[in-house]
Image: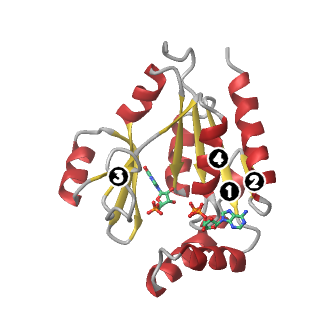
Amino acid sequence: MSRVKEEKIIIITAPSGSGKTTLVKRLLNAYPLLGFSISACTRQPRPGEEHGRDYYFYSEEDFKQIIEEDAFIEWEMVYTGKYYGTLKKEMHRIWEDGRYPLVDIDVKGALAIQDKYPTTSLSIFIQAPSIDELRRRLVARGTENAQTLEERIDKAEYELSFAPQFHKIIINDDLEKATQELVDAVAGFLKAEA
Ligand code: ADP
Ligand code: 5GP
């Protein structure tokens, strides 16, 4: 496919446990014009995750080298000692391929990209119906221990205060309804192609 006419970006952000990964998968299936931007990170892969598909998994030393090379659009220490970053070359790979990058990113990273691309990005904040429900979902997902669970809940409470700064907030109560809202928002934004 030929490169896109306008370099637009879709930013999806949410406190951990809100259903962002679930919704992003559904959006990517519904909308082939989007390309998932694979981030770099220094955490360990979870069972089933693959380097170059879910993330580019790097050592801290290699990640810091990439920072030195100025190859990130943004990067953050998202959890204690764990770095995550959006690679410039990922954005360009997806645009060259005639698609629009979808970045799945923490709240601060999302604000950083929104600031860099104020008119060509659409930022969407996914919100669980309540903190209690968010806790239930994280426990049910079974990926956290007591300490990482509390860290994610604390961070979620803090991140919720940033919600009004994004272009759109979607409450993920009913999954089907939230998916449709997300697809409609992205379709509306991309249709405004010059
Ligand atoms: P995130 O990527 O935001 O951390 P996930 O997509 O992993 O969140 O969702 C957290 C858990 O909640 C998963 O087990 C997922 O299946 C579940 N989940 C997602 N959306 C809903 C929903 N609308 N109702 C109930 N459970 C949900
Ligand atoms: P997880 O470890 O659960 O995969 O992701 C933890 C958090 O890091 C999620 O909120 C995810 O969106 C965020 N994240 C993933 N990639 C990036 C990135 O490139 N930059 C930033 N700032 N956050 C990211």
Marks 2 & 1, CB-CB < 8 Å contact: yes
Which class describes the residues within 10 Å of circle 3: few (<14), some (14-19), or many (20+)?
A: few
SS for dot 3: loop
Horizontal side of 120 relative to 64 (left or right) equals right
From the image, tell me which residue sits under label 2.
Answer: 170
From the image, tell me which residue sits under label 4.
Answer: 26
| Quarter of the image where the C terminus is located | top right
Which class describes the residues within 10 Å of circle 1: few (<14), some (14-19), or many (20+)?
A: many
> Gap between marks 4 and 3, in whole Å?
19 Å
Q: Looking at the picture, how far across and down is residue 63, in whole percent? A: 25, 52
The quadrant holding residue 57 is bottom left
Which amino acid, by three-letter code, is at mark 4?
Arg
> Gap between marks 1 and 4, in whole Å?
14 Å
From the image, tell me which residue sits under label 1.
Answer: 126
> Gap between marks 2 and 1, in whole Å?
5 Å
Which amino acid, by three-letter code, is at mark 2?
Ile
